Image (cartoon, grey):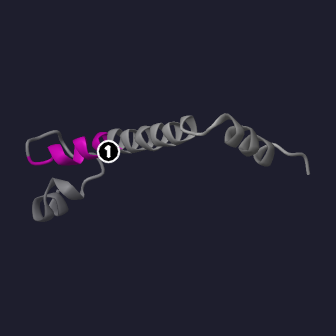
Amino acid sequence: AYISARYGDYVLLKPPVKAETLPLWIAPVAFLVVGLGLGAAYLHGRRAVAEGLSEADAAEARAILWRDE
C-alpha cells in the first residue's frame, strides 16, 4: 500500500483498470496489432516482388534455393 500510495498504480504487477492506468492495459494489445500489421505488410511486399519475376527468373531462383547439396 505504501509503494502504491507513493509511486502510483503504475508500479503494481496487476494495476487496477482506471483511466490513469488504461495505457498499461492497451499497450500490449496495440504492440501486437502493430507487429502483426508490419509482418503482413512485409510478407505482402515479398509476394509482390516474387510475382514480378519472369518465368525464367523464377525457375532460376527455385533451382538456387532448392538445389541438393
Q: Nearer the viewer, residue 31 or 69?
A: 69
Location of residue 3 in the rendering, given as x and y in whole percent from the top left corner = 18, 63
Chief SS of the magenta region = helix
Residue bearing the label numbered 1: 28
The residue located at (33%, 38%) in the rendering is 33
Identify the image quadrant of residue 54: top right
Q: Amino acid at mark 1?
A: Pro
Left of 57 or right of it: where is 10?
Answer: left
Left or right side of 45 for 4 = left
- Reply yes or no: does residue 14 show up in magenta: no
Image position of 61 (left or right of 66): left
Instruction: Tell me where the magenta segment starts and ends, as one range.
Output: 20-31
Q: Quadrant where the N terminus lies?
A: bottom left
Quadrant for residue 29, please give it.
top left
- Count the numbered circles shown: 1
Instruction: Looking at the picture, tell me which residue is in the foreground, 58 or 32.
Output: 58
**Relative image position of residue 39 (x, y in whole percent):** 44, 42
Circle 1 packing at 10 Å, graded few (<14), some (14-19), many (20+), is few
Residue ID at (32%, 46%): 31
Which residue: 78% across, 48% down? 64
Q: Is 3 on the left or on the right of 34, as rendered?
A: left
Question: What secondary structure is found at the residue carrying circle 1?
Answer: helix
Toward the viewer: 52 or 26? 52
Residue furthest left as drawn:
19
The image position of residue 21, as x and y in percent, is: 15, 47
